[in-house]
Structures are given as C-alpha cells and as structure tokens.
Amino acid sequence: MSERLLEKRTGEGVATWNRRIKREQLADEDSLRAWLTKQGVTGYAQTLLVMERFGYPDFLTATADELIDGQYADRPLLRPIFDAVIETAVGLGDVTIQARKTYVSLVSPRRTFARVQPTTKTRVDLALRVEGEKPGGRLQPSKIHETMPVQIGLSSPKEVDAGVARWLQRAYRESS
C-alpha cells in the first residue's frame, strides 16, 4: 500500500527514491524526513522510505511464530490459553490467523471477527465482533478495538469452553 501511495503521489517507485536518497547522503532519520517533506513525500510513503534507508523494525520482519512467541515470552502460563483459542477458532472453518506485535487477529474470508491479546500477566482477552451485543455475564466492554464491542477475559485454558466456542462461532458467522 505504501509503495503504491508513493508512486501515485510522486510518479516514482521505491527503487528510484532509494537512489535519490543515497545520492543525498543524509546521515540520520530527521534529516531524511525533512528532505522527503520538502520533496512532497509524507505519511506512509515517507515512513516506507525511512525504513528502506535505516532498516525495518524487527516486528515487521519477524515470522508469525516469532511475533506470537514474543507476546508470551514474559507470561508463559498464558500461552496455553492462546493455543486453546486458536484451536477452537480454526475448527470454525476458513480462518486466517494474522499475528501482529501485540495481538493476533482471527480473520474470516470477509473480515476480522476476533482478536486475541495477552492483556496482563494473568489474562488473555478475546475481543469479538458481534452485532448488537451488550456487555453482561462473561462479556465485558472491549478495550481492544472499536469494531469489537465485547471481550471475554480468560485466565486459564479451561475457560476456553463451549460458551467461548459459541461466541467465536457467532462472531465468525456474522463476519463471513
């Protein structure tokens, strides 16, 4: 997306911009950003070129396994909860698992239907995209993402039970 944006706004691709940046011999990120701004390159396109010049953050080059391992490195007792949620979600059908630095998205063929996030040292939160559902019982107001109005706090793998499976199934169905 950032590459397309750069080309659309400037008429030149990443390779051309990388050559121009190399010729400028800018020594630090601030100098490069200032120069790019003068050239009319801002936002995502600018960030892309800065990363091209000074390197991509580890989380952008990490594998999904590395990202997930990183999320649970300081809270290994929560990893079985995550694994139980994933096992349940995969059983729903065509589910894509997208790992990010701090959370994992569960995606139906149409859109994200849930997010799994180790929120504290003792709890994994499962946010759900369900329409018209108000918090109550196990469902708490979600703090994870505005498109997911409710979440379930999970403190042990045993809590990933038939009730959680039904909520995941509903979120999947509504998002498929």
Image (cartoon, rainbow, N blue to C red):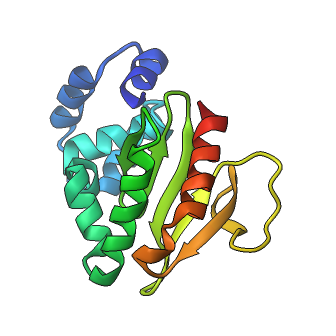
Q: Residue at x 48, y 20 (%)?
A: 9
- The residue lying toward the viewer, choosing from 25 and 151, is 151
Q: Residue furthest front?
A: 162
Image coordinates of residue 167 in percent, x first then y, are 62, 54
Quadrant of the frame with the N terminus: top left
Image coordinates of residue 92 in percent, x first then y, are 47, 41
- The residue lying toward the viewer, choosing from 62 and 172, is 172
- The residue lying toward the viewer, choosing from 29 and 156, is 156
Image coordinates of residue 109 in percent, x first then y, are 49, 28
Quadrant of the frame with the C terminus: top right
- The residue lying toward the viewer, choosing from 109 and 66, is 109
Q: Residue at x 32, y 72 (%)?
A: 80
Image coordinates of residue 73 in percent, x first then y, are 25, 77
Q: Is residue 117 visible?
A: yes
- For residue 76, side relative to residue 157 (left or right): left
Residue 2 location, quadrant: top left
Is the residue 124 above or below the residue 6 in the image? below
Q: Is residue 56 visible?
A: no
